Image: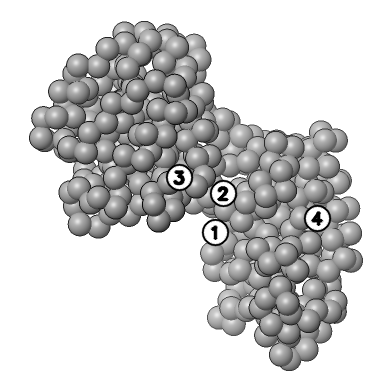
Amino acid sequence: MKSINDINFKGRKVLLRVDFNVPVDDNKHITDDTRMVESLPTIKKLMNDGAAIIIMAHFGRPKKGGFEPEFTLEPVAKHLEELIGRPVKFTQELLGSGVPEKMAADLKDGDVMLLENIRFYPEETKGGEELARQLAALGNCYINDAFGAAHREHSSTAVIAKFFPNDKYFGFLMENEVRNLEKLMQNPPRPFTAIIGGSKVSSKIGILENLIDKVDNMIIIGGMRYTFTKALGGKIGNSICEDDKLDLARDLMRRMDEKGVKYYLPVDSVIGDKFGNDANTQIVPSGEVPDGWESMDCGPESCKAIRDIVMNSKTILWNGPAGVFELSTFAKGTHEIANYVAEACKQGAFAAVGGGDSVAAVKQMGIADKMSYVSTGGGAMLEYLEGKVLPGIKAIQD
């Protein structure tokens, strides 16, 4: 696949799909513009080439069909102007009114236009081909830089690509995601260690099953580990557990044994007598949590063991926190793992961090730049790790 770095888009009208689904406060002020900043390299490359840029993005989950004021991209358009230092043409009128069509037709080289929320069209999330045709008619080439929506077969993320068989590309963000994910899953340097956390086994079944054939070590942390601990006969007190997944946990451990995958469950836990920073705490063996207490984090012995595994790994995938890291009382395990992974990277390991909580942790600690790769798309990365084909990637590669 040709990189946009090798192409000059001067005189072209580029349809650019991005993920600008940013958080806003009650006054519609953007509280975190990370997703916008991440696509700036692609936008600036096109601006510097002298392309006319027509940006497509979604915001929130509009339900009614048609314009809904609470989901307008107007605040995004204003902030984008600040980020790129030039005007952004924008209208709240939708396709079919003739207004965005005329604005797109009148764009000059170097102009930037943002279409109103692409999810105001019900056909978008259904992968409607007619909407994709209407969008395609606005430009003469297509670039997808929205990895966060790459797992959706929507009109603007996948279907539109068929109208540009010879002029469809990944933006820099998408290119980086695809390259790093392929490196992670197709031919990783070994030993390869996966650190998988989260509250429920049920949300990570696909990842665990797909990774069994790929990793050398599997470290299971977070709330999901207590299902495994209970499956082994341990006492977990009031800790989170999916009783209907105990047989599945036993089966996964059996399969890892058969494949020669070394799996590790934390041996000690930081427990609390309630869910809060002011909880009374103690450290106990993981399978000896007393009634009325809840396991909330990995203990110090577990952290030491995890460090030894991580520091002897050449490839590391980390998805999911060690405990309830949003409570400072129970954040140490997650922070320790983040530091171990950063330390391993410094010594030459390749480490990928994905999933909202893991990414939030490394950003909160200010060490995201010390990781080899931090994914921008939680759901998209999860589906890739499950072995699924992502429509937004396939549409460009076909």
The residue tagged 3 is 30
The residue lying at 61 percent from left, 34 percent from top is: 180
Amino acid type for the residue under numbered disc 4: Glu
Select label 3 or label 1 by which is in front. Answer: 3
Q: Secondary structure at mark 3?
A: loop
3D distance between C-alphas at marks 3 and 1: 34 Å
The residue tagged 4 is 336
Mark sitting earlier along the chain (4/2): 4
The residue lying at 80 percent from left, 74 percent from top is: 270
Give the left or right position of residue 245, taking residue 99 as reference: right
Amino acid type for the residue under numbered disc 3: Ile
Give the left or right position of residue 141, taking residue 367 as reference: left
Picture quadrant of residue 350? top right
323 above or below 48?
below
Question: x%, y% of residue 192?
Answer: 75, 45
Within 10 Å of disc 4 (Cα), the crowding (few <14, some 14-19, many 20+) is some
The residue lying at 82 percent from left, 41 percent from top is: 344
